[in-house]
Amino acid sequence: MKNKVIKMIALILGSAFLMVGLTACEDNTVMKFVIDNQPYEEQAALEQAESPAEFAAQTPLYASIYFIESPKGMKYTAKWLLNDQEIKSEEKAMLTDQHGIIVYFLEADKVMPGNLTFQVLYRDKVVTEQSFTIK
């Protein structure tokens, strides 16, 4: 009887630690994030890149995000907001298991002067975001 109780407590504690670990992974899935006029599809190039503070209007933009702790098929939604108004939303799934890069694209005709914000959401919760100026 005592062995069963000890095993049950160990199972409950193990499950609790696993749930806390999985929840923490969902909150910290973005390892690197860059917005630029070109996509970064290789991890080494993305790690070297930095997002400019501002962009010119009528130029295409790419948001390259390196995700970790994300199983194949996990879906993230990207939202582009110009002056707090949504101008594009797009959902993409991880094509690789546990880590990989997803690139989102904003067409040049949607890049207008103002304040542009890019958000990445998982289950309607903002995972990361970045704002910058369009001149």
Image (tube, rainbow, N blue to C red):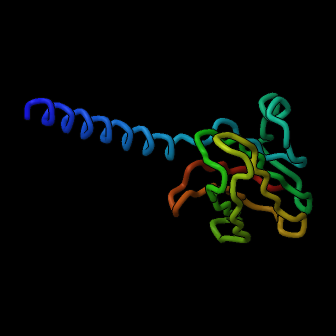
Query: Across the whole image, how many numbered discs are drawn on residues?
Result: 0
> Viewed as shown, does residue 9 lie left or right of 115?
left
Q: Which of 47 and 95 is in front in this view?
A: 95
> Viewed as shown, does residue 8 lie left or right of 31?
left
Q: Which of 124 and 42 is in front in this view?
A: 42
Q: Nearer the viewer, residue 11 or 43?
A: 11
Q: In which quarter of the image is the C terminus?
A: bottom right
Q: Nearer the viewer, residue 48 or 130?
A: 48
| Residue 122 percent location from the top left of the image | 56, 57
Image: 72 above or below 109: above
Image-quadrant location for residue 110: bottom right
> Viewed as shown, does residue 8 lie left or right of 19?
left
> Viewed as shown, does residue 56 lie left or right of 69?
right
Image-quadrant location for residue 34: top right
What residue sits 75% from the left and 52% below the top? 133
| Residue 18 percent location from the top left of the image | 38, 39
| Residue 80 percent location from the top left of the image | 70, 63
Give the residue furthest to the left. Answer: 1
Image: 76 above or below 16: below
Q: In which quarter of the image is the N terminus?
A: top left
What residue sits 15% from the left and 36% below the top? 4
What residue sits 24% from the left and 33% below the top? 10
